[in-house]
Amino acid sequence: MPLKAVCIELRPNLCSGHVFLQFEHDLCNSNKTRVVIKENDMHIVEDVDVDEAEAASELVMRHANYGMDIQQISMFTASNQNISFRFNYTQIDLDAVHKAGNLQVEPKPMPLMLSFAERQIAVTLRCSNCHYELVASCCYNKLREFPSGLIDPSEFFCHNHHGNTSNQQQQQPTLVPGPTDLYYGLNHIVLNITVLQRSVINSSDHLYCKRCMRMLGHLILEGAAAKLWADALRWLPSANQEEKQPPPSSSASAVPRQLFQHSTVSQLMLRLLSNLWMQSVPQFGGSRALLVASMPDRRQHYMLIQVLERQLAVLRRLPKVPVVAQKQLHYLRACKLYFRVYNSSEAESELLLKQQQQMELPKLSISPYLFAELQARLTRNSQLIPKAWRHNCAQEQLLLTYFFYEREQQEQEEELLREQPSKPLNLKQKHAQKLETDEEYETDAGLDASLDEDEDDNDDDEDEEQNDSDDEQSDTDSEPKSTLRHKFAPIMAYEKNLVKRWPTQRQSKSSPCPSPTMPPDPCEEDSGKH
């Protein structure tokens, strides 16, 4: 059965639930699709042909395990690749739901804490993409929380409560950190601009890595400080610190680390909602907010969100799990919301201006990388909703979707499954293929036997260009990929030097007295052959 995704909303206070099914194909491609509810379970049945003996069935939920007595369904909707319906029950065993669904504790925002302490360890700040050193080794004397965009900085600090307000011009510099100070907030840090001037490029108050041009942040406080996004940075203990306290594994010390503890996307979303609404989401009219991100092209993008429920209980199939557990339902919490993304075009800016005029929206700045990740997740999860229910109204066109909270360990495992197997396997396969090719052409004369064919030179040039391009990764490259690239750097350097030596070896074979100071030009050799 081609069920792509399953999501079941549970509302014990209403004794009901809502099932959302997403198929891998359009329902019109099958002759008949039925929802069969039995005493113990619920199935989806598809009749491929007229003969019912060939009907395919797939389990949706075994509701007997949860103590539910489902008898009827309502609000049945089927369109394109989606089926949704509501079911009612008279009893439910919540303990069984929690146990069978691998319940974790209700997700809550963890304290915002850096992963290193002040006055204890000297650290270097690096680019998360190319690992270029942005800030030299420093043992920070002061680590303080910086106010978010929703709070007036003058009300956040207590420097205005001394009774003497005559010298107003000295209030602003108190927010600028010193050279050995570091302020931090929601997914960002604030540093004195003097510690960054030699390692970043400033373009219209936007800061970029000098090596790979990855966007790091922007200037604030009239250019005296830099606000850098945490997901664009990594940190490493300084070399002297590693010598004093050698780790148990030398390879682990070279792995760049996240700036914040509990830095998963789920935790960032929980902290974001907590910053927007300190207590709880208002039920009427006050649940909208505007997320603002300045993209690497220096254009601002906006995401209007309207939160409906922050802690909605759902049963869901996890998309990236082993095959054995793919059809198992997991009990999770989700945030149900409407959203829409606006770019900087004039037409959409006017539409956004109307939204802001209707009500006062709280605004919060986030990094472009978090903005893109949220947009991707919300857009993907909106595919669970039938098209007839996806938008709130024709005028606003807000899209209904979910944000599923995941455990920190679960997100880390999914990240490893998605990124770690591909990179090392490709590098090892590439190196093994290289060795096999060398062994295939190698004779008693050594590597010179493989240099008589021009096609090998072209292949080697392509390998060299590919190796050179590995040093310049895109903004979307992940941390494990960069780490593995540095791990295999000696191998790639050896291959580069080997390719450069082959033309010299070829000439030494053809000419008895080659010039030691003038290496042969491969282009001249090719023309000489012809």
Image (cartoon, rainbow, N blue to C red):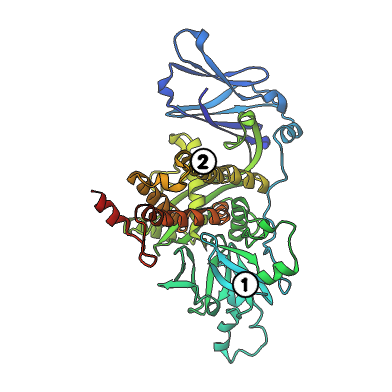
- Say which of 323 and 133 sits in front: 133
- For label 2, the crowd category at 10 Å Cα-Cα, with few meaning under 14, some 14 to 19 and many 20 or more, is some
* Residue type for callout 2: Asn
**Where 490 sits versus 220, above or below?**
above
Residue at the spot of label 2: 381
Q: Earlier in the sequence, mark 2 or mark 1?
A: 1
- For label 1, the crowd category at 10 Å Cα-Cα, with few meaning under 14, some 14 to 19 and many 20 or more, is many
What is the total number of numbered labels drawn onto the structure image? Answer: 2
| Mark 2 vs 1: CB contact within 8 A | no
Dot in front, 2 or 1: 1
Which residue appears at 40% of the width and 72% of the height? 204
- Say which of 320 and 402 sits in front: 320
Which residue appears at 73% of the width and 72% of the height? 120
Q: Residue furthest left?
A: 530
Q: Residue furthest bottom?
A: 166
- Residue 183, disc: 1
* Residue type for callout 1: Tyr
